[in-house]
Amino acid sequence: MRIAIYARYSSDLQNPVSIEDQLSLCTDLMKRQFGIDKPVATYTDAAISGATMSRPGLINLLDAAEARSFDVLIAEGLDRISRSLSDIATIHELLVHYGIKIWTGHEGEVSDLHVGFKGTMNALYLRDLKEKVKRAHRSIAASGRAASSIAYGYSVVRGVLDEKGNYVNGLRKINPDQAAVIKRIFKEYAAGIPLRQIVRSLNDDGIPSPSGKLWRPNSITGEDHRYKGILHNDLYRGLLVYNRTHKIVDPRSGKRRYVVNPASEWIPSPNSVLFQIDSGRKHINADLRAEDCVATHRANLSPPPLKIGLPLTRGLLQGLLSAAGAAATKALRTTLDMFAQLTALNANAGMLAAKGKKILRTAFSRPFETR
């Protein structure tokens, strides 16, 4: 009998040793129940939620199951395989189709009853957990702490305890090196320097981007409707905002997208703990508000951006060739007119071809007459 083991833990805040503990439990179950010392394969997913099917370990497991590479799958519990009721039902149905049994340390041999009952309980637990996490995040944001990931220009403050002796999460402090880069970007942008030139100079100076790779325009501009990107991030003008967006996951593809919440649901914290910790230093962007820099930059840009299209191409090329004389301009116009005529001829040819095909289909669809 060939046995495979699957283990998973859901958060990067959990102990990675959890994987080893699960593998040890599954190995003991395998030895005790089947008398086998070593599995044919082990699949793991670290710091990945059980609410999604987009897990490398799970995908490899299902591929191996389709190839009939093992006969029994062992996990610590059904919730390790998936916390989604629909997903665990799909996985169970697939494995049954492939002739593979599921055993877990919590449920034993998994049946349809386990999938229905425990799958529902796991789905309810996941929904309750999401609400608890949101409630905790709202409390953190209301107290002026960060409930999201670390933004560029800031560092995590660790080791701070509250009056009960518990560690306080969500504290930030200014990162001096990255703060200088932020200030440089705002000043250059406010001075009217083109965005691509700013990006090029940062890369030429060997300054890593927030991702640790090369800078790109999107890193600076981001998405203004989501307040993403350095120029649109309220953190750089002293305002911490929580619950500005929420995530939606497509149940079929697993793709994620973020939707902006109504402004009435935002939780702003202008007096953040971040600035109280570093009260002796002004905010890195106190003298450069984001919207002021954007407005100044647009005012300094000349000429205004042009629309892309055939009129732009013709006008731009005519301007470049005006110094060469009227003959060059006339030749350019002739070329453009010829191109337009060729395009029209191609369109007419396509229409004629379509009509010809229709005539042929009509002719051959009729029965032949004999005389």
Image (cartoon, helix red, strand yellow):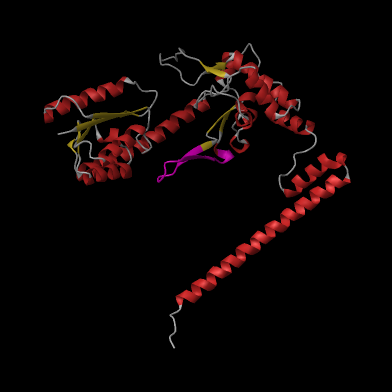
In the image, is residue 189 part of the stretch drawn in magenta? Answer: no
Q: Is residue 88 above or below residue 158?
A: below
Camera-side residue of 143 and 112:
112
Assign the N terminus to one quadrant of the image: top left
Q: Residue at x 67, y 20 (%)?
A: 183
Assign the C terminus to one quadrant of the image: bottom left
**Boundaries of the magenta span:** 246-264
Q: Is residue 54 left or right of residue 331?
A: left
Residue, far front? 371
Residue 278: percent from left, percent from top:
59, 13
Camera-side residue of 332 and 62:
332
Q: Is residue 319 left or right of residue 216?
A: right
Q: Residue at x 88, y 46 (%)?
A: 326
Quarter of the image holding residue 45? Answer: top left
Residue 240: percent from left, percent from top:
58, 27
Q: Residue at x 73, y 44 (%)?
A: 307
In the image, is residue 255 part of the stretch drawn in magenta? Answer: yes
The reply to whether residue 5 is visible in this rendering is: yes
Q: Is residue 53 above or below residue 215?
A: below
Q: Is residue 207 left or right of residue 304?
A: left
Residue 150: percent from left, percent from top:
52, 23
Q: How many callouts does the rendering have? A: 0
Camera-side residue of 107 and 322:
322
The reply to whether residue 283 is visible in this rendering is: no
Q: Is residue 87 left or right of residue 145?
A: left
Quarter of the image holding residue 22? Answer: top left
Residue 215: percent from left, percent from top:
60, 25
Q: Is residue 126 above or below residue 277?
A: below
